[in-house]
Each structure stands twice: as structure tokens, then as C-alpha cells.
Image: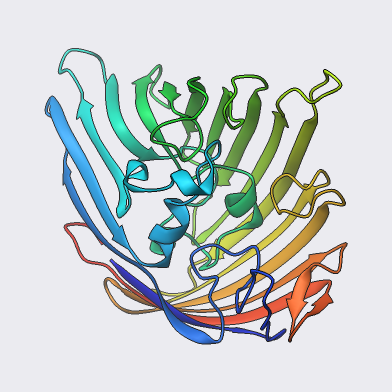
Amino acid sequence: MIDGYYSFNFNRPNTTDGFDQLNQLYNFNDKTDQFELSSAKLTLNHAPDPVGADIDFIYGRTNDLINNSASNTTTTTFVASQLPYLEQAFISLKPAKAKGFEMDFGKWVTSAGAEVIESMSNWNYSRSLLFVNAIPYWHFGARTSLPVSKTETVGFQLFNGWNNVSKSNGGVSGAFTSALVEPKYTWDFNYLVGPENYNTTAGLRNLFDTTLLLTPPGKFNAYINFDYGMNQNEVVSQGNNKLVTWYGVAGAFHEQASAKNAIAGRFEWFDDANGNQTGTYPTGNTLYEGTFTYEYKWIEGALMRVEYRIDKSNLQYFDKLANKFTDQQQTLTVAFIAFFGPKR
């Protein structure tokens, strides 16, 4: 897959405060007023029979973001230990007589969230506020899945936290997953819990993530995604732990108007009152976002997307021109995506 874009930010940000020419709160298409390679990806996969493996090599701005985002290590510890240029790398075991049971070991993308890293598999081109701020990208450890009925699959995971190959605190995290797939809807639920504070096992991070995908007959689909997270920080001098929370909801629709044309919309609200995720501590952020995307399929495996997005904040949060601030951000993006493989 190759994914590139040009984005225009109507605020024309040009500052020296760490947000120089960036679409703030964006992922993978955050560079603005310039052409940018979001990602180039190569996947090698062998389905387990009973042993298999998956390796996803990735290059570009996407690699920079997902592999430099450890939750409980300092930025100076990010080196080869984070497995740069690898989005995923895991081995799989699926015994023939185990009734669908599968176990993976290695690095894999998180099961949380309504969207994924690959833009071609999402309805909109930009990622939601919940994808950027509420959930992790990936984990390193072991995970299992087992069908418990004709429509539901459950799983259990043990891993080294959020976006970590190795941890500073020595404590593993865990997750419970459930996927219920019915003819007209799919319901996914994920619960993640574990110590995620730097250099201590004190304090737990909890994440509740659920998505309801509606798939009625016809060409119209929709989903609603809810996330609630809370992190109990390490013990402070008074002997108390500080609890920070973040939560939000996103709704989206997709209409396949014809074989070549599709439209999609997304609307969401995200509350970061403690400043844990968006970096605005101590005041915090309440954010609103609306996105409209038009998609045109040139040929099978080649897409163009044109997207307009507006973000609003209760704060003067977004950069405008040189060293000015405003409570809103509007962008216009044109993207081209090409992907090739056995299934397109």
C-alpha cells in the first residue's frame, strides 16, 4: 500500500511552539501546506495451518507516530527497542482440533477503536479524535481468541502496556475482547487494564471501548463508538493518587452511492478535562469534530479522497499564523491511496 496526501489548514499555522505547520490533534495526515507520504506498507502473511506468521513493514509519517508513542517510557528510551518500521510482527498458532482457538505472540495493532491505521480500511481519511487521544496503537505480548458461539468470539491478552515492546515499570497489562457479529450489526467490546505510569507499578490505567456497527441491507452503514479511560497517576507527596479521565463518543456513516463513488461523515465529542491526552493540563480540552469525505475509485485498488474537516475547542487551543491562537481549525485534504494483493 502507498498512501500520500496534500492538506491545507485555513489557520496557516507557522509557529515555534512544537506545532509548526501541523494539523493539531491529527494522526498520519498531520503535516499541512505540503505534500506528504503518510505510509508505504508491505505485508507478508501466512495463515496458521496450524502455525502462521504476519509481518507488516511500514514507512513514512505513520511509522514515526505509532513507533514513538510509548506510554510509560521517556522519549530518550525510544530506539530500536520499539521495533521501528514494523507495524506488526507476530507468530500464530491455531491447532486443528482446538475448535477455532488461536494464539498470537509478538507485536500487533490494538483491538480497541472503530478505526484502524490503514486509511483504505476506514470510511474517512483522517482519524477520529478518539483514535488519536483515547486508545493505544499497538501492543507486544500474547493474545488469544476463541469462538464461543456461531456469532461471538472472545479473547484474552497479556502485553507490555500501551505502545511498548519493553516497560520501565515491569508490570504487564491485560485485555478482554468480545466481537458479536450478527447479520445486521456487529458489536465489539474491549476492556484494557494495567500499570502505565513511568518507572512505577503504582496506579492503574483502565480503558472501556465499545463500537456498534450497523449493517442494514443496502449500501448504507453507520457506527457509534464510545471510549472511557482513567489513569491513576503515581503516588504524589501527600500520599494520594491523582486520577485523570478522558471520554468521548463518535458517530459515522458511509453511503456507497455507486460502484465508483462514496460519501462518508463523522461527528464526535471528546472531553479531556484533566489534560491527560491532548497536553493542555491543567485546564483541559473539550473538543468537537465534524468530517465529510468524498471517495472516488479510479480502478480496483486505487482511491482518491477529498475531505473537509472542522475541529472546535472550548479553549483558544489551535495555532493560527505566527504565535496566534483560535478555538477552531479547518482543513481541506486530497489523498491518493493505492493497494495491491490477493484481495482488494
What residue is drawn where x is 68% and y is 22%? 203
What residue is drawn where x is 30% and y is 58%? 58
- What is the quadrant of the N terminus in the image? bottom left
Q: Is residue 94 above or below residue 255?
A: above
Q: Is residue 212 above or below residue 61?
A: above
Is 96 left, or right, of 246 in this rendering? left
Residue 81 lies in quadrant: top left
> What percent of the width, then of the height, locates residue 301?
27, 71
Is 9 left, or right, of 182 in this rendering? right
Is 286 left, or right, of 96 in this rendering? right
What residue is drawn where x is 47% and y is 59%? 122
Residue 153 seen by the camera: no
Q: Is residue 174 above or below residue 117?
A: above
Query: Extreme top residue here?
Result: 97
Is 54 left, or right, of 268 in this rendering? left
> Between 193 and 209, which is closer to the camera in this rendering?
193
> What percent of the width, then of the height, locates residue 265?
62, 66
Residue 92 seen by the camera: yes
Residue 121 lies in quadrant: bottom left
Q: Report the coloring of the rendering.
A: rainbow
> Between 312 and 33, which is closer to the camera in this rendering?
33
> What percent of the width, then of the height, locates residue 18?
64, 68
> Between 164 and 248, which is closer to the camera in this rendering?
164
What residue is drawn where x is 44% and y is 37%? 164
Residue 22 lies in quadrant: bottom right
> What percent of the width, then of the height, locates residue 329?
73, 75
Q: How many marks?
A: 0
Q: Is residue 278 above or below residue 164?
A: below
- What is the quadrant of the C terminus in the image? bottom left
